[in-house]
Amino acid sequence: MAAPESALHARVQAPGTVARGEVFQVRTLVTHPMETGLRRDAAGHLIPRDIVKRFTCRYNGVIAFTTDLHEAMAANPYLAFHLRATDSGVLHFLWEADDGTRASLEKPITVEA
């Protein structure tokens, strides 16, 4: 069974055009409550852990940035990182949550000589 897609709302900000060899910033934000599994509801029952556990960015199919997230990460995780422009292509972003939900986005990038 395939994991549910897009229960998470994700946004990416990166330039559409960059010069070859230029280092550029990528900023990402995913809307998610990031429940730690340590809090209790009004009846005193533990609220199950539900976090975005992994983020991956691929540049033309090659992993360019990846990280595992943990309970201490704030709700609506924001990540920023830098990449070097090598070739025109696609940046593919994937967020994966504990419950199997996933969000993915693609951002085309044009590299000028």
Image (spheres, rainbow, N blue to C red):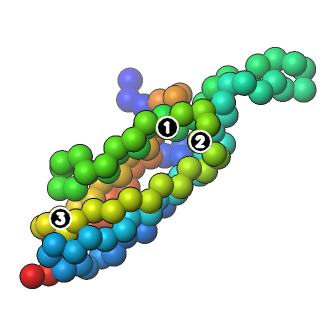
Task: Kindly report the distance in space between the C-alpha atoms of the residues bearing marks 2 and 1.
Answer: 7 Å
Question: Which residue is tagged 1?
Answer: 69
Disc 3 target residue: 89
Mark in the foreground, 3 or 2: 2
Question: What's under tag 2, amino acid-wise?
Answer: Met
Q: Give the alpha-carbon distance from disc 3 to disc 2, as whole Å.
A: 31 Å
Q: Residue at x 33, y 75 (%)?
A: 15
Look at the numbered disc 1 and give the secondary structure of its residue: loop
Q: Tell me, yes or no, whether the two marked residues, 2 and 1, touch with CB atoms within 8 Å.
A: yes
What residue do we see at 66% from left, 43% from top?
33
What element does badge 2 sit on? loop
Residue designated by label 2: 73
Amino acid type at mark 1: Leu
Rendered-image quadrant of the N terminus: top left
Circle 3: residue type = Gly
**Residue density around tag 1, few if under 14, some if 14–19, many if 20 or more, within 10 Å:** some
32 and 6: which is toward the camera: 32
Residue 5 screen position, x and y as percent: 45, 41
Q: Residues within 10 Å of mark 3 (few under 14, many from 20)?
A: some
The image quadrant of residue 66 is: top left
Looking at marks 3 and 1 on the same chain, the residue that comes earlier in the sequence is marked by: 1
